[in-house]
Amino acid sequence: MKSISTAVTRFFGVLWFAFRRLRSAPELTIGMLVGLITVVTLSSSIPMYVEAANNRILADELGSLEIRNRPAFSFMYLYSRLPGRDVRWEQVAAADRYLASSAPATMGLPLTQSTLYVHSDLFSLFPQGTDLYAGDAGRRALTRLQTGFVRDIENHITLVEGAFPGPVGPGEPIPVIMTQAKANELGVQVGDEFVIYRREESTDLMQARRFEDEIRLVGIWVATDSQDLYWFLQPSSFDNLLIMQEATYLGRIVVTEQPYSLTYAGWHQIYDGGEVQASNVRRVISAIGRIRAQMSILLPDVNFPISPAWALERYQRSVALQSKVLLTFSIPIILLSLGYVIFVSTLSVTQQRLEIALLKSRGTSTPQVLQLYLAQSLVLGAISLAAGLALGRLMAQLIGQTQGFLQFVRTEPLLVRATTTSIQLGVLGIVVGTISCLLPAFKWARLTIITFKQFLARSMEQPWWQRYFLDIILFGASLYGLYMLQQEGALSFLLGGQGDPLQNPLLLIAPTLFVISIGLLFIRVFPFVMNLLHWLSRLLPGTVPLISFGRLSRSATYYGVLLLLVITVGLSVYTASLAKTLDHNVTERALYAVGAEVSVDEAAWLTGSSASGGMFGNAEPTADGEAGSETTAVQLYLMPSSEAENVEGVRTASRVVSMGIRADTGDRGTVIGVERTTLPSVAFFRDDFAQRSLGALMNELAYDQRACIVNRAFLAAKGLNVGDSLSVRVNNAEGTRLELRVAGTVELFPTIYPSESETSTPLLILANIGYLEMQLGYPLTGKLWLDVDRTVDTAVLQEGLQEAGFRIHTITSALDQINREQSRLERVGLFGFLSIGFMIISFLSMLGLMLYAFLSLRQWTIQFGVLRAIGLTQTQLWLLVILEQTIIVALGLLAGAAVGIWMSNLFLPFLQVSYAETLPLPPLIVQIAWEGVWRVWGIVGVALGIVILGMVRPLQSIKMFEAIKLGEAQSL
């Protein structure tokens, strides 16, 4: 007990001492806390947001099911007899028992309602006393009805007349009930007796099999509440059903074991899905699959017309994509936060080297020094974990308020809570952060007074990572990752969420390795650049540049902050460019799919000439039913596309038509008729779609009405060139031949997607719409592509076009698609994380610079005293501080921006995100976020101003003898 008490006392003593040491250096403590809290916040906020956003997405998916007046977790299992595939009641009973007992346990959700509906095939209904074996004249059926039962129907109907069927004895008529609508139609009453009759010819036995039985109508019913969830089918669906008790149906109808006695069995079940959340959706989907599989075994040919499985599976695909996207784009930011922790820890341990040496000289062992730093890390870790989880929740909510990059709006807040995964990742972040804090301590824990003096004597020795060429190794690994990306063309798990991102981790961290390796390589060559500038500074007047470049060429103390600046600025530019590129690509994909900002699918008017000379497109029919009997000709009429420009909100309109064609070579394709004068003003067209502008291509169509533009891949595959002739046939009844001349080429054209099923390169032709109409002999209907005011409402636009005389089938707005895409929670999460990541990176670069400057203030104080002693004026010393800090920051900013731009151009083309499993069109084009460059430069510039002011004011008041005294103390 005494040893345990001693160990506990020693443990708390170490913690107390560690806490006091942290208090003695508040700036370092705050700096490390910021880094650790950032790591925990980033690590925990991702699963928090994913959980909250996925619950919202799940609610939306299930809510779309409930719109149809059916609970989201409604299931229908339906068996319908197929010809030649009979089923026995024992199979239906086994399936019924399974759904009633085992299925709820498999589902893991409360079963709130379960209904079984079984019926036979149609029977002929005859009045009692009819001679069933007489000729056709003696066998006139009232109607044909089914027999069956609906479980628990008695609790959901109201009997207008009579009573619900009771038990029936042998030989007694079967008591049944009928809907009021059917009873009124047949004119029958309660108490009437009938005969049901079925005759089926057997081709094998060449004899007739007959079934007949007597029934008595004992009740007429209506639904008590037709909106009740019990009615999975409308009550009117039971008009042709004679409902009897379940036992009666089994004992009098099914017992015959004839195929027609059991032709339908349907179960409708409703589960309480209130407990279904993002965390257990996978289990529910798996349970639904197991129930389906078991039902298929028990009852072959069963199908599942109603189920939430498709909505849950679509949700799961969305979740998979969202999680993988956030994982992919969060890794660089989290690794940077850990790098910042290492940077601050290195600054802290560097400041405490003399203290470590003194402790070692007084008998403290190396393990005890490490225990002290471990205790400090545990104290910081405990505080950071609590603060980071709280901030992670706030960060997840802020992510949910994102509209675009660095754009936040007030919307309905997400219900964010700490999850098991978020706590686990937060703890993991603290563990990794703690290890990061201890890494510098391992280097200096063995330090003594002697080894400390030896280190000061050889302080110009290369860093270990330079001696072991770590920078070159990391650069080679990043280039190999880039090569693998080029081979694959894209990260497959960002396309529809398919694949495992951890299958090849190098692809995930390749961008991070690249920026780190370039930063390290920059540090390697930086002294040589400073030596060159030092040599050139001898040609400049004054001593300040000479001293500044000389100090920078000899000192390695600034390596850490310079590396931090290069990496943070590079990642900031990369993050901003990533957001801008993805946002731009979303807009371009919508425009490519629609063709223009708005596409109107129009139809032609039928027109003709009458004796009176009037138009008869809406002519009234004559007495004999023939419309337009005085008509002598009929033709199609289309409103000129220019008329659409008179509609409010429309700037330009152009008609585009599309037809299938087949070339003489057998290749199939599409010919698109265009209005060459207006198309360039409305169509979405990028520079990479063709080697020439769309306007130049349309000018080629003006020189020859037979001129056409063809996709370059087809020409290359067939060995054709510009200027060659091309003959194709239209896929119409006449097979109209078109003689064309190739006047130009395109790579891509809006709305045209390559077919994966094609074995050869599909043919695409752009031709004059006038030439096509002349060859075909009638006006062509197609689409109107519109360039519109961005604020125009689609419904108002459609109404305006109709009032102008256009006949519209459908209208599609790319602007509406863009707005819907921007509101998707998957996109909100991505841009929210990129926005906050950009702010965090910028803040860490600013804080790291300030920490470095203020922690080196003591060294600057000593150097000020020495420089003052050799004759430098106070103004020269101020200029020295300003110039040196400005050089470091300016080079860090320039190098970081260059790295970020280079990195964006290399890696962003492979980070296209798509909800489909294929690369969408058009291809992603990198957009450099220059506004992000200026923004991060401004943030670091502000930090530089604070640093300069914060350093100059204390240094100008230092006394020479104080500086020399500090230098003597530091060299002890």
Image: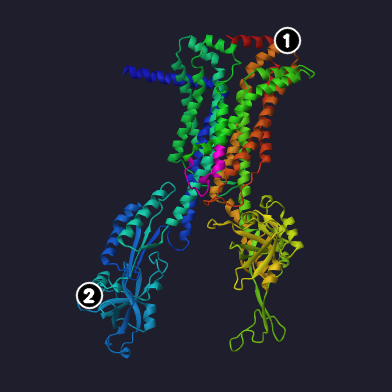
Does 683 sit left or right of 73 as displayed? right
Question: What is the secondary structure assignment of the residue under circle 1?
Answer: loop
Q: Which residue bears the numbered disc 1?
A: 870
Residue drawn at x 54%, y 45% is 829
Vertical order, 611 against 794 (above or below)? below
Residue labelled with disc 2: 168
In the rendered image, which quarter contains the N terminus?
Answer: top left
Q: Camera-side residue: 544 or 154?
A: 544
Q: Height in image: 964 above or below 206?
A: above
Viewed as shown, does residue 179 lie left or right of 383? left
Which amino acid type corresponds to the residue marked 2 in the rendered image?
A: Val
Q: Nearer the viewer, residue 39 or 138?
A: 138
The numbered dot on residue 501 is none
- Which of the 4 image quadrants contains residue 292? bottom left
Q: In the rendering, at what x and y percent does residue 403 appear? A: 60, 47
Q: Residue 595 at x, y = what percent?
A: 64, 58
Residue 376 part of the magenta segment: no
Instruction: Give the Cα distance between marks 2 and 1.
Output: 122 Å
327 above or below 35?
Answer: below
Where is residue 740 shown, x and y percent of the image? 69, 64
Residue contact at pointers 2 and 1, CB within 8 angstroms:
no
Work out which quarter of the rendered image holds the C terminus and state it.
top right
Residue at x-position 67% and y-position 20%: 552
Task: Answer whether residue 487 is magenta in the image.
Answer: yes
Q: Give percent across and percent down for residue 237.
A: 39, 72
The figure's colour scheme reads rainbow
Q: Indicate the secondary structure of the residue bearing disc 2.
A: loop
Among the 4 quarters of the image, the one containing residue 399: top right
Q: Which amino acid is tagged 1?
A: Ile
Q: Residues within 10 Å of mark 2 (few under 14, many from 20)?
A: some
Q: Bounds of the magenta span? A: 481-501
Identify which residue, 132 or 117, lies in the foreground. 132
